Image (cartoon, rainbow, N blue to C red):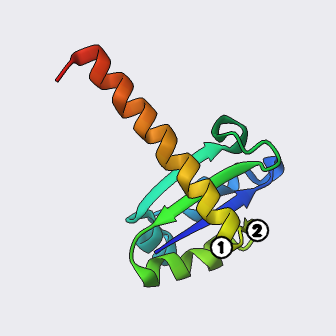
Amino acid sequence: MFAVYNVKPADRARIDAALDPKTPLGNVVSRQSVSVRDAAALGLKDLGTLVLIEGEEGAVKASSELFAFAEKLPAERAEEARRAFKAQEDDVASGVGLIFGP
């Protein structure tokens, strides 16, 4: 399960606070796969900073409370953003393979 949140530039600093492992919900959510990227770097220029949270259903649902200050992307847009995250990760991985070889 996954969720993608669009964080406005003014709220960028709130991402770290939301994922603070010293808080009960922050501890649960921060243990999931969490990726943060500028939307423009992913080719999604009409959005701010994107937070992708992938993991256990309960933790992903709990992330809605932590990211109440952000816009949770609707399913179709969230899937588009998730594909962009994965494509960027794949590009990085293939680049490292070219540098260090098989």
Mark 1, residue position:
75
- The location of residue 76, given as percent across then percent down, is 67, 69
- The location of residue 33, given as percent across then percent down, is 41, 59
Q: The C terminus appears in which quarter of the rendering?
A: top left
Q: For the residue labelled by badge 2, is the local secondary structure a helix, a strand or a loop?
A: loop
Q: For the residue labelled by badge 1, is the local secondary structure a helix, a strand or a loop?
A: helix
**Numbered badge on residue 18:** none
Q: Outermost residue, left direction? A: 102
Pointer 2 and pointer 1: residues touching (CB < 8 Å)?
A: no
Say what amino acid the circle numbered 2 marks.
Phe
Q: Residue at x 54, y 80 (%)?
A: 62
Residue nearest the viewer, comparing 93 with 23:
93
Q: Residue at x 72, y 58 (%)?
A: 6
Q: In which quarter of the image is residue 79?
A: bottom right
- Badge 2 local density, few (<14 within 10 Å), some, or many (20+)? some
- The location of residue 7, given as percent across then percent down, is 74, 56
Q: In this view, does 76 lie to the left or right of 62?
A: right
Say what amino acid the circle numbered 1 marks.
Ala
- Badge 1 local density, few (<14 within 10 Å), some, or many (20+)? few
**Numbered badge on residue 69:** 2
Residue nearest the viewer, comparing 3 with 98:
98
Image vertical order of residue 6 relative to residue 63, above or below = above
Sequence-wise, the earlier of marks 2 and 1 is 2
Image vertical order of residue 24 relative to residue 49, above or below = below
Q: Residue at x 78, y 50 (%)?
A: 47
In three-dimensional space, the C-alpha distance between marks 2 and 1, rounded to whole angstroms, equals 18 Å
Q: Residue at x 83, y 47 (%)?
A: 46
Q: Outermost residue, top direction? A: 99
- The location of residue 16, given as percent across then percent down, is 58, 54
Q: Nearer the viewer, mark 2 or mark 1?
A: 1
